[in-house]
Amino acid sequence: MYKSSLGYKNQEQCQLLAVSLSEEIREELENDGNSWYITFDGSMIDKRTPIYSYDSKNKKPGTKQAPELVDFIMRNMWTNGWPYYDEEEEGDRNHSKKAATRELQLDTGAIADESFRKLAGDITVEMYWGSTSEKVTETDSEKKKNGTPLVITVKCKVGKQSSTITRTYELAYSADSKPEDGKEIWGWFMTNPGEERGSLEDEESE
């Protein structure tokens, strides 16, 4: 009985962490409905310049800097270092789901609660982005990038308990973008909220 009770407790904590982290990622990406201002150095994102929130009213960068995960996503999408995933190209190992998926481990150092910190150590964030309906070789940045899907899965696994939530986002490429001047404006919105999926193997009562 005690093993079963402990298992359900761990399952509940695992669900809470997975859903909470997924929601935090959504809030960071969507940025309260605001876009992100990205500067380019030639054809690549300028690594020396932070990514800032975009002030659409004044049409200039704001003061809010992109969180670490959001920064990683936008600096690496549409680069050779992070290939896109296309189900129709699954036979091409360069664009298979395995090749396109990036996995990040959660930094647990800032979590005060010891029990949650231990659980968080088993949380991973997996993500991949896909090509749009336009050809990837399209030179028009708006046609090529607008509508780019981004799929993010948060997984928590402790022993026989697990919890997973997958959400899909879409890139909104702003008309304020001027790639020829080294400036692009990206926004994000969720298209599929997903649902938490958990599993718990039954233990024999004691």
Image: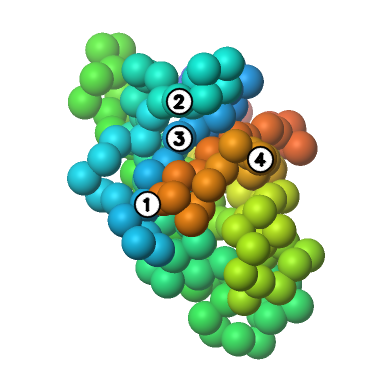
Looking at the rendered structure, the secondary structure element under dot 4 is loop
Q: Is residue 150 visible?
A: yes
- Residue at (21% x, 45% y) in the render: 48
- Coloured how? rainbow
- Circle nearer the N terminus (1, 4): 1
* Cα distance in 3D space between marks 1 and 3: 10 Å
Q: Badges 3 and 2: C-beta atoms under 8 Å apart?
A: yes
Image coordinates of residue 72 in percent, x first then y, are: 38, 46
* Cα distance in 3D space between marks 2 and 1: 15 Å
* Cα distance in 3D space between marks 4 and 3: 12 Å
Type of the residue with mark 3: Tyr
Image coordinates of residue 24 in percent, x first then y, are: 51, 23
Which residue in the protein does label 2 denote?
60
- Circle nearer the N terminus (2, 1): 1
Type of the residue with mark 2: Lys
Looking at the rendered structure, the secondary structure element under dot 2 is strand
- Circle nearer the N terminus (2, 4): 2
* Cα distance in 3D space between marks 2 and 4: 13 Å
Q: Badges 1 and 3: C-beta atoms under 8 Å apart?
A: no
Kindly identify which numbered label has been placed on residue 40: 1
- Circle nearer the N terminus (3, 2): 3
Image coordinates of residue 170 in percent, x first then y, are: 68, 43
Q: Is residue 141 above or below residue 65?
A: below
Pick whichever, 5 or 84, lies toward us.
84
- What is the crowding at mark 4: few (fewer than 14 residues within 10 Å), some, or many (at least 20)? few
Outermost residue to the top = 112
Which residue in the protein does label 3 denote?
37
Question: Toward which corner of the image does residue 16 lie, by quadrant?
Answer: top right
- Residue at (67% x, 80% y) in the render: 90
Type of the residue with mark 1: Phe
